[in-house]
Image (cartoon, rainbow, N blue to C red):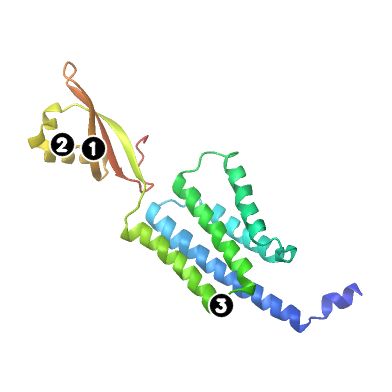
Amino acid sequence: MMIEQLTIITSDQIDNLTTLTLRFAFNLVATFVIVVLLYARISKRKEFYFSYFAISIAVFLLVYLLESVTLELGFALGLFAIFGIIRYRTDTIPPKEMTYLFIIIAVSVINALSKEYLGYMELAFVNILLIGALWGLENILMMRPENSVVIIYDKIKNLHKENETMLLEDLEERTGVKIKRYHVEQINYRRKVAEITIFFDSNGNSKMETK
């Protein structure tokens, strides 16, 4: 009996396997675009590659294969709760990385649970819509994370308003980053130094200690 079940392939099994393969391909392509072409290209960070792809694949297969449990929305929300708990038991993850993790899980759940509601054209549109929204947030609105670092500056004569251009050029030359704005925290005239906080876009490449 067991041998017959392993050797006989029904048309329903072929249909199910085809659906699984196509849905998995949709999910993998969407994950690749989000992780590689959006997140990594802009943030310049690749240490989350393994985690994002592994979680995407695991969540997709878990949700797809257990859909018959009929928990659907409650089951999907339970996954978010589980990963939320895991997040607090691990090292601190920056907000942007946590957001992308949430998106990866959401995409996997959508691609796995929407079999009864969406055709392939609609599913492709949903994935493209989500990816397009992320691209817009990253590029059009320039909503990139901003880092800051405190500099002990020794040319206080450049703090005069008329010397602002010289100040920015000197700070950018010393730090190697493009400064968006700065704030003078305090000036020590006895030591002839100033404490300045500079703000710049986070690209994952800066080796300066940020706060």
Per the image, the residue denoted by label 3 is: 120
Instruction: Identify the image quadrant of residue 131.
Output: bottom left
Q: Is residue 172 left or right of residue 92?
A: left
Callouts 1 and 2 close, C-beta under 8 Å: yes
Can residue 101 be seen by looking at this rendering?
yes
Per the image, the residue denoted by label 1 is: 182
Q: Callout 2, which amino acid?
A: Leu
Mark 2 surroundings within 10 Å by alpha-carbon count, few (fewer than 14), some (14 through 19), many (20 or more)? some
Instruction: Identify the image quadrant of residue 53.
Output: bottom right
Callouts 1 and 3 close, C-beta under 8 Å: no
Question: Residue 114: image x %, image y %?
Answer: 61, 70
The one nearer the camera, 58 or 129, is: 129
Question: Residue 50: image x %, image y %?
Answer: 55, 54
In the image, is residue 133 above or below residue 164?
A: below
**Considering only order in the chain, which callout, 3 or 2, is on the residue closer to the N terminus?**
3
- What secondary structure is found at the residue carrying circle 2? helix
Q: Callout 1, which amino acid?
A: Tyr
**Nearer the camera: disc 1 or disc 3:** 3
- Label 1 and label 3: CA atoms lie apart by 50 Å
* Image mark for residue 167: 2
- Label 1 and label 2: CA atoms lie apart by 10 Å
Callouts 2 and 3 close, C-beta under 8 Å: no
- What secondary structure is found at the residue carrying circle 1? strand
- What secondary structure is found at the residue carrying circle 3? helix
**Considering only order in the chain, which callout, 2 or 1, is on the residue closer to the N terminus?**
2
The residue lying at 46 percent from left, 44 percent from top is 94
Question: Residue 124: image x %, image y %?
Answer: 51, 74
Mark 1 surroundings within 10 Å by alpha-carbon count, few (fewer than 14), some (14 through 19), many (20 or more)? some
In the image, is residue 66 above or below residue 90?
A: below
Q: Quadrant of the N terminus?
A: bottom right
